[in-house]
Image (cartoon, rainbow, N blue to C red):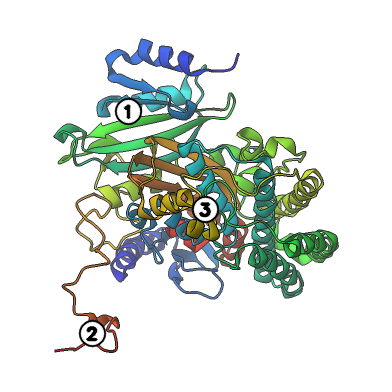
Amino acid sequence: MALDNNTIKELLIAKFADKVSAFDEPWGLLTFEVTAGSAHELIHFLKDDATLRFNFMTDLCGAHFPENEKERQLSVIYHLHNWLDNVRVRVKVYLDGENPEVDSMVDLFSSANWQERETYDFYGIIFKNHPDLKRILNMDEMVSFPMRKEFPLEDQGRTDKDDRYFGRVPLNQNLN
Amino acid sequence: MSIATSDVIQKRYNELIKEKENEDGSELSILNLGPTHPATHGIFQNVLLMDGEKIVDAEQTVGYIHRAFEKIAENRPFYQITPLTDRMNYCSSPINNMGWWMTLEKLLGVEVPKRVQYMRVIVMELARITDHLICNSILGVDSGAFTGFLHIFQAREEVYEIYEEICGARLTTNMGRIGGWERDWSPAVWAKIHKFMETFPAKWEEFDQLLTRNTIFMNRCLHTGAISAEKAISYGFTGPNLRAAGVDYDIRKMNPYSSYEDFEFDVPVGTAGDTYDRYMVRQEEVRQSLRIIRQALEKMPEGPYHADVPDYYLPPKQEVYSSMEALIYHFKIVMGEIPVPVGEVYHCVEGGNGELGFYLVSNGSRVPYRLHFRRPCFIYYQAFTEMIKGGYLSDAILIMSSMNVIAGELDA
């Protein structure tokens, strides 16, 4: 019998009760939340349970929601895939905006290593027990976490810059 | 990245050297391979700890051409993100383009006509051919066989001429629109595709004869850089590299998109997961791609070249000037007043080197709230250290080219 979303949902609720919540199926992909404390246990369960068998971590990434209440400002999103039944799930963990910490999944999936480093690099989310949590794409001297929403891109239409230094001066413009 | 990183690594290695020398008296050395080295195609740095010519340990540094695509994407309307996807795996940019359009169509609920889907299949398979062609011919160059590369690159040129005829660009294509194509394919496009289909298979077999059973090439490739299926899965391998390890995971079969279920093709798998198997899987995938294109050309249905979605597809210019409705739609699309559903969607396509995924979170505005690219290179390149440990330096170069690590995709 192929695994369907309801079976997964029932199994998870039976084991994790109120630690899992907000079940939804946007475009058929089972999506739910789990508390930061149980994330590692849940993904371990998804991977090793004889029925669930989610053997592949497709993707791991972060997201920032500055408008949420403080406990839910940062999030980590895991996409897992069961290749035997061809089912995917999306697991979300919401974290505290000031002190975001979640357990690392490197011991379960080696592929999480760099993806967690990338998420740390861009969002400043601390993955506990990660073997080597440091920046990966940005330079080591950087102090901010640039994918957070408080860092906007420069407005292309800003006028406070001296255009002469950027080669954007129309020919007939008075430079004084 | 910076000098600081290598300093840290070098300090650690210096300690390792001391320890090791105390143990058995052998001398270790540090070798900086990259960031810009003629033997690595792209900008990668590998600090290697060497025992003579053998690699004891390695540390990778990536990010030299990081361009913050995900951040830029959060500030661009949906249709302006396609040029960013071009620049990820630039050896097969049409696959990236089509993957992005399909993600958007999934979010917006756009039904694409069968003809468009078949045309997309053709262009994606052409892209796969060029991707594998580049990877395999460069693998030949790295093992000292330049001839095959020189011969087969003529064929890549022909594919780029097809792209040029379709969209005007060659490498970073930015093809297509939401719901289809910006214009119908001209007779010249079809003529070029047919000509390519006639001439290329023979060229490919000739290339195959130059390398596949070549003793030098086989000696260099067999049993180097092998990875087991179990480890490959744990490291998040997808695409030809995973199939070389013996796992038949292919998204075109597993979650067919763009009518791939209509075509008959096989998924080649290897057994050992070594450099030679990766080469062989790519060789065979090109033949399968040709098979798919042939079927698509035969079965090409009649119909429009774009979906009828005035909310997302720009009307023809003449109509904008002559009819009120077209003018309104044109204005709405350009000024970003199109309705976009709130939600999150994940869509993946089989890219040149694996599962290329797009995770898009939309909050109803004209720009993505969050867009994450699942870049196959970035995920499987972390296994490189483990694959080269214990091997020779010259093997490491071959392993890297056989993995088809594209710097643009690695760093995004």
Q: Which amino acid does label 1 sit on?
A: Ala
Closer to the camera in the image, B368 or A125: B368
Closer to the camera in the image, B363 or A174: A174
Picture quadrant where residue B53 is located: bottom right
Q: Measure how far apart labels 1 and 3 are at the Cα level.
A: 48 Å
Of labels 1 and 2, earlier in sequence is 1
Q: Count all numbered tags in the image, as a single digit.
A: 3
- Per the image, label 2 sits on a secondary structure element best described as helix
- Of badges 2 and 3, nearer the viewer stands 3
Whether B123 is drawn above or below A36: the answer is below
Chain letter, disc 1 residue: A
Which x, y percent locates residue A99?
16, 39
User: Which residue carries the number 3 mark?
Assistant: B315
User: Which residue carries the number 2 mark?
Assistant: A164
Closer to the camera in the image, B332 or B206: B332
Q: Residue B200 carries which label?
A: none
Which x, y percent locates residue A118?
35, 50
In the image, taking residue B168 as reference, residue B295 lies left or right, namely right
Tag 1: Cα neighbours inside 10 Å, few (<14), some, or many (≥20)?
many
Q: Can residue B244 be seen in this view?
A: no
Q: Which residue is drawn at 19% across and 72% down?
A: A159
Whether B337 is drawn above or below A9: the answer is below
- Of badges 1 and 3, nearer the viewer stands 3
Q: Are marks 2 and 3 in contact (CB under 8 Å)?
A: no
- Per the image, label 1 sits on a secondary structure element best described as helix
Q: Residue A39 carries which label?
A: 1
- Per the image, label 3 sits on a secondary structure element best described as loop
- Of badges 1 and 2, nearer the viewer stands 2
